[in-house]
Image (tube, rainbow, N blue to C red):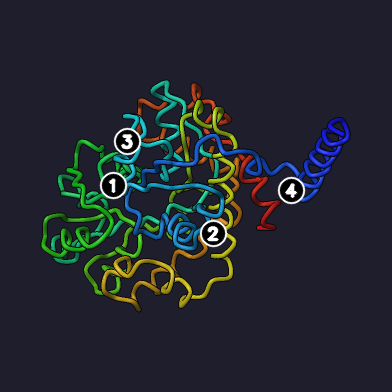
Amino acid sequence: MNNAFFTRRRFSSAALLAAAAIAAPALRAQGKLEKTRISLAVGGKAAFYYLPLTISEQLGYFKAEGLDLEISDFAGGARALQALVGGSADVVSGAYEHTINMQGKNQFIEAFVLQGRAPQIAVGVSTKAVPNYQTLADLRGKKIGVSAPGSSTNMVANLVLSRAGIKPSEVSYVGVGTAAGALAALRSGQIDAMSNTDPVMTMLEQKGDVKIISDTRTLKGTIEVFGGPMPAACLYAPVEFVQKNPNTCQALANAIVRGLKWLQTAGPSDIIKTVPESYLLGDRALYLASFNKVREAIALDGLMPEEGTRTALRALASFDPSIKADKIELRRTYTNDFARRAKEHFKA
């Protein structure tokens, strides 16, 4: 009787495993999560740059994957990266180019699901502080607001200024965050220009507070600034973490890709209902105008475009002498394995 019982147990277990394999081919997150409680750092969560993260969180997609996500929001991406390096975060929702910067310092981190296919960053000059602005040369010696020094907003400002022969040391960068503080810093005259994300830049633009001089909120504008497609927000983690926690990384990628799929068909009213009220910065209509401006910059399926990684490396090497393009192995800065499986599963 015992033998029959164990035979039946073995048979039913095998049948269940086979059924599971058919139901979810190669979807690793069906395996046991190595780590369910994840500390995630992000720099400026209210920005559209990180909208897929917010959507996936608000709609419960991380919970649906068995994850207990603890999100720490910092003033900018550079601060979120510091949390990862310091060991207080497992994963970062941040700019892809940080993986290149860190490899240049011999620290290997890997992007494993893409949230944005354009940086969504605009550079604007204060119409009050620099009323007679003509060319980029007028910004030499000026104070320029960025989300946080060293962040993606800082990188875009460096790149734009470098084209006029202005070195990073010839301006003063001021960290202003990505929300109400950024609006106040420009309007009060604390800064002369700003490189920042939406909804902040659209709000300043529509009220006439800034003149936009460089814009990567659209795919066309991104190609004009960078000379090719430029990946933006992604989830990244140390290579060692990704290797040790493949099922957990798959679950994270699943949640983001599911959020990206939802965003493909979401209307403005869906967005308003889903994001926290504070993200609207007190102006619902302008928030929606901003969303419409950056909508095409949101990734579709979480996959990192290979050409985009080359664009990022070229951009960084063009103004940062510490980045030696021939020494960077781009294949070690990202993997599409998790996003590909999530895309197949959710038909994104």
Q: Are marks 2 and 1 in contact (CB under 8 Å)?
A: no
Q: Residue at x 24, y 72 (%)?
A: 208
**As shown in the figure, which amino acid type bears the numbered disc 2?**
Gly
Question: Gap between marks 2 and 1, in whole Å?
Answer: 22 Å
Kind of residue at disc 3: Ala
Q: Earlier in the sequence, mark 1 or mark 4?
A: 4
Q: Nearer the viewer, residue 61 or 348?
A: 61
Which mark is in front, 1 or 4? 4
Dot 1 amino acid type: Phe
Indicate left or right for 337 with 325 as reference: right
Label 2 vs 4, first from the N-terminus: 4
Residue at x 17%, y 56% (from the top left corner): 192
* Circle 3 crowding by C-alpha within 10 Å: few under 14, some 14–19, many from 20: many
Q: Position of residue 155 (x, y in %)?
A: 34, 42
Give percent across and percent down for residue 15: 83, 43
Q: CA distance from mark 2 to mark 4?
A: 19 Å
Please report contact status of discs 1 and 4: CB closer than 8 Å, yes or no.
Answer: no
Are there few (<14), some (14-19), or many (20+) residues within 10 Å of tag 1? Answer: many
Q: Which mark is residue 83?
A: 3
Q: Which residue does the numbered mark 2 point to in the structure image? A: 259
Residue that badge 1 annotates = 74
Q: Are marks 1 and 3 in contact (CB under 8 Å)?
A: yes
Q: Quadrant of the N terminus?
A: top right
User: For numbered disc 3, what is the local secondary structure?
Assistant: helix
Label 1: state its secondary structure.
strand
- The residue lying toward the viewer, choosing from 296 and 233, is 233
Query: Residue 238 at x, y = what percent?
Result: 46, 30
